[in-house]
């Protein structure tokens, strides 16, 4: 891959799943729609390329959390890439083509009163911020922007509405949590931290700094060393939260950042368990 594609031979890459999330998601159960002051009472899931093809568990965990909280949900009937990878490479024509595929579909869900959730913060940011900025005169971009939520933003707001269950069965212990750049710039606060700290017996240490991976940049042969150098402060801070004995969790809303951090921690990661925040919240509920 290094010789043909320019992917550094030492970069630990995400796996490819044998079956997509979309094709393995269980049928949704029927629940009463309970709108809150801050949140619509039904959810449309934009599955994302990563959850579909690399780590379907993220999608299944999100579904499990919605079902446990008796929130009606559907999978968006059709989707293509959100456009963030094209955007970061400056391929604005490619972004426009993907926008024309996604927005008409997502607009229908927005008009029908769904909250639209994506389990990857880059995708959420693309619809929340980048597309509305690129196309300020497009009413569909504005409609989708207003309907789009980060999953933990949605869950914390559901709690404020008095509509989120807090029947947690399992403490999480120490969680070393990295908040990715694409979550920070959504200007919603540290909603993942707030959600995890609802779990009794859980101590969350937050690292708020770029991991150095930066989408596809960190996999490239010419930038791999720089990506690891940029990430060193994060690697040290994530490892500093480990307990004197026993294991602890290393977590980030961005799954490629989490994988990058674990690689950069090296031997310091021997007692660390990598788990997405959606997985952690599901484990706390015991579902």
Image (cartoon, rainbow, N blue to C red):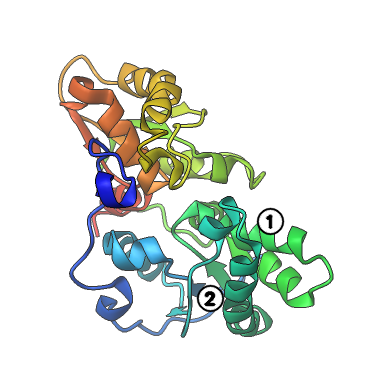
Q: Point out residue 257 in the picture as x, y percentages from the top left corner.
A: 39, 40
Q: Residue 42 has which mark?
A: 2
Q: Residue 229 has which mark?
A: none
Whether residue 201 sits left or right of residue 18 in the image: it is: right
Say few, some or many: other residues with alpha carbon within 10 Å of mark 2 (under 14 / 14 to 19 / 20 or more): many
Whether residue 257 sits left or right of residue 153 in the image: it is: left
Q: Secondary structure at mark 2?
A: loop
Q: Point out residue 7 in the picture as x, y percentages from the top left corner.
A: 31, 45
Tell me the residue that label 1 is attached to: 129
Say whether disc 1 or disc 2 marks the residue closer to the N-terminus.
2
Whether residue 214 sits left or right of residue 272 in the image: it is: right
Q: Secondary structure at mark 1?
A: helix
Question: Please, which residue is most extreme toward the right here?
Answer: 137
Q: Quadrant of residue 86?
A: bottom right
Q: Is residue 162 visible?
A: no
Q: Nearer the viewer, residue 262 or 189?
A: 262
Q: Is residue 223 visible?
A: yes
Cα–Cα span, label 1 and label 2:
22 Å
């Amino acid at each position: 891959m290094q010789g043909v594609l320019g992917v550094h031979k030492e970069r630990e890459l995400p796996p490819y799943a044998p079956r997509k999330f979309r094709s393995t998601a269980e049928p949704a159960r029927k629940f009463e729609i309970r709108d809150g002051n801050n949140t619509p009472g039904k959810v449309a899931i934009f599955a994302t390329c990563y959850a579909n093809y690399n780590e379907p568990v993220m999608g299944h965990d999100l579904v499990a959390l919605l079902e446990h909280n008796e929130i009606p949900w559907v999978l968006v009937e059709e989707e293509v890439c959100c456009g963030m990878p094209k955007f970061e490479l400056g391929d604005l024509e490619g972004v426009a083509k993907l926008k024309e595929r996604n927005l008409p579909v997502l607009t229908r869900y927005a008009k029908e009163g769904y909250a639209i959730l994506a389990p990857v913060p880059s995708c959420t940011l693309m619809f929340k911020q980048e597309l509305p900025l690129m196309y300020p005169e497009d009413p569909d971009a504005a409609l989708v922007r207003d309907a789009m939520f980060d999953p933990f933003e949605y869950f914390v707001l559901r709690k404020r509405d008095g509509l989120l269950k807090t029947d947690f069965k399992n403490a999480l212990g120490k969680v070393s949590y990295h908040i990715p750049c694409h979550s920070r710039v959504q200007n919603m606060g540290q909603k993942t931290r707030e959600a995890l700290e609802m779990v009794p017996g859980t101590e969350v240490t937050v690292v708020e700094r770029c991991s150095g991976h930066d989408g596809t940049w960190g996999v490239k042969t010419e930038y791999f060393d720089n990506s690891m150098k940029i990430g060193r402060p994060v690697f040290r801070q994530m490892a500093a939260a480990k307990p004197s004995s026993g294991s602890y969790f290393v977590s980030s809303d961005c799954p490629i950042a989490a994988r990058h951090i674990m690689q950069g921690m090296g031997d310091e990661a021997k007692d660390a368990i990598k788990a997405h925040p959606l997985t952690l919240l599901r484990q706390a509920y015991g579902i």
